[in-house]
């Protein structure tokens, strides 16, 4: 697994004086079929979300509002992506350790996922995660 699998993807942006519009379509702008969407909001200052990898689930994360950092780690190299535009999203394949931090006030993280929620799909042990790399 190499960092080249991460991808910051620029989404369509339909400029309009009435307000701009962006969108995603499964298997077009992101390389998977969407089974689930969730969002993270009302994050108190200084809090951190995530801190795990998924065995199977792939995700695409958009800062719909505000900003936050997503730190991804393939077991060898870590990279920080600062998301602060609603027409960019970060694609994260399965098998990548990731966490989110530095949330701005009123930020909204919107995530689309390739799998339904399953507690069994989570790897919370970083040592075990590294062992499988
Ligand atoms: P979790 O994925 O651990 O959040 P984060 O990685 O951002 O810290 O999820 C927190 C809780 O929410 C956990 O009890 C599982 C539940 N949850 C669902 O029920 N469905 C979902 O789609 C997600 C993402 C979480």
Image: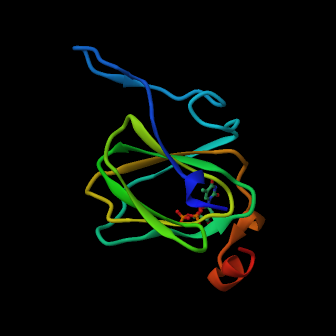
Residue furthest toward the top? Answer: 17
Residue furthest toward the right? Answer: 120
**Which residue lies at the image location 74% right of the left edge and 59% below the top edge?**
118
Ligand 1: give its quadrant: bottom right
Residue furthest toward the left? Answer: 17
Q: Is residue 52 left or right of residue 67?
A: right
Q: What count of labels does the image hold?
A: 0
**Residue 27 quadrant:** top right
Q: Quadrant of the N terminus?
A: bottom right
**Residue 33: where, in percent of width, then height?**
70, 35
Q: How is the image coloured?
A: rainbow
**Which residue lies at the image location 71% right of the left edge and 74% below the top edge?**
133
**Residue 46: where, in percent of width, then height?**
31, 72
**Which residue lies at the image location 31% right of the left edge and 47% below the top edge?**
84
Q: Is residue 101 left or right of residue 29?
A: left
**Residue 90: where, in percent of width, then height?**
49, 47
From the viewer's perspective, is residue 93 above or below residue 18? below
**Which residue lies at the image location 75% right of the left edge and 76% below the top edge?**
132
**Residue 124 quadrant:** bottom right
**Residue 69 quadrant:** bottom left
């Amino acid at each position: 697994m190499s960092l080249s699998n991460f991808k910051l993807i620029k989404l369509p942006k339909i400029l309009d004086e009435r307000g701009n519009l962006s969108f995603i379509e499964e298997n077009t702008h992101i390389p998977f079929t969407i089974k689930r969407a969730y969002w993270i909001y009302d994050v108190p200052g200084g809090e951190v979300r995530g801190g795990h990898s998924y065995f199977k689930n792939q995700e695409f994360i958009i800062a719909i509002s505000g900003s936050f950092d997503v730190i991804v780690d393939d077991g060898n190299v870590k990279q920080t992506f600062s998301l602060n535009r609603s027409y960019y999203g970060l694609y994260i394949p399965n098998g990548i350790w990731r966490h989110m931090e530095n949330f701005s006030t009123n930020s909204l993280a919107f995530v689309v996922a390739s799998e339904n929620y399953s507690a069994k799909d989570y790897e919370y042990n970083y040592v075990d995660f590294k062992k499988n790399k």
